[in-house]
Image (tube, rainbow, N blue to C red):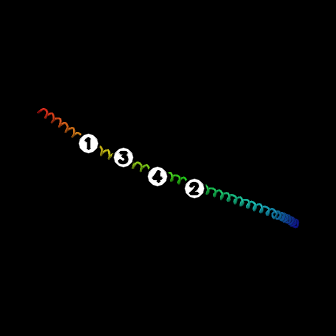
Amino acid sequence: KARDENSKMRMMNEDLEQENTILKRENEHEFPRELKQLKDKINDVQAKREMERAELNRLQRLLDRRSEEKEFDRVEDLQYDLDASEELRQQLEETVLQQETLIEELRLELNENRINSQLDDERVKELECVVDIMNETKENEKKINAND
């Protein structure tokens, strides 16, 4: 009976060894295939990553270019505003000069009018004096005529 048991055990052991050998062979064939598939997946992921990195770099360059264009446009706008401000400043300066000239002309005219007014006042006083003198002369003539 022990021999039967021993014999059964040996047969089971041989069966297990055969199964183990078969499994090893399958693993040797399957594992390299799985390893290759994993390597292929890794390569695909890396390639995809490189493409994404290249696209990201392209987008970053585009963004930088647009930022530069916006900055350039902003500088152009500021230059335009500065030019317009300078033109307006020059116009204001011209207007101020014109107003100062006009004020000076009006001041001269006012002074001339004052002088003329003073002359007119003096002339009026002279004429009043002449009228007074003429009136006195008439009065004196009347007195002289009345005395005669």
- Local SS, label 2: helix
Q: Quadrant of residue 43?
A: bottom right
Identify which amino acid the numbered label 3 is placed on. Answer: Leu
Mark 3 and mark 1 residues within 8 Å of each other at the beta carbon: no
Look at the picture and state if 122 lies above or below 144: below
To which residue does mark 3 refer? 106
Judge the density around disc 3: few (<14), some (14-19), many (≥20) Cα neighbours within 10 Å. Answer: few
To which residue does mark 1 refer? 123
Residue 83: percent from left, percent from top = 51, 53
- For the residues labelled 1 and 2, the Cα–Cα distance comes to 75 Å
To which residue does mark 2 refer? 72
- For the residues labelled 1 and 4, the Cα–Cα distance comes to 48 Å
Foreground: disc 1 or disc 4 = 1
Identify which amino acid the numbered label 4 is placed on. Answer: Gln
Between 65 and 6, which is closer to the camera in this rendering?
A: 65
User: Could you tell whether 66 is left or right of 14 in the image?
Assistant: left
Identify which amino acid the numbered label 1 is placed on. Answer: Arg
Look at the picture and state if 96 lies above or below 8: above
The tally of labels here is 4
Mark 2 and mark 3 residues within 8 Å of each other at the beta carbon: no
Decide which of tag 1 and tag 2 comes sooner along the chain.
Answer: 2
Q: Quadrant of residue 117?
A: top left
Identify which amino acid the numbered label 2 is placed on. Answer: Phe
Mark 1 and mark 4 residues within 8 Å of each other at the beta carbon: no
Decide which of tag 2 and tag 4 comes sooner along the chain.
Answer: 2
Q: The N terminus is located in which quarter? A: bottom right
Decide which of tag 3 and tag 4 comes sooner along the chain.
Answer: 4
Residue 26: percent from left, percent from top = 82, 62
- For the residues labelled 2 and 3, the Cα–Cα distance comes to 50 Å
Q: Which mark, by number, is residue 90?
A: 4
- Local SS, label 4: helix
Foreground: disc 2 or disc 3 = 3
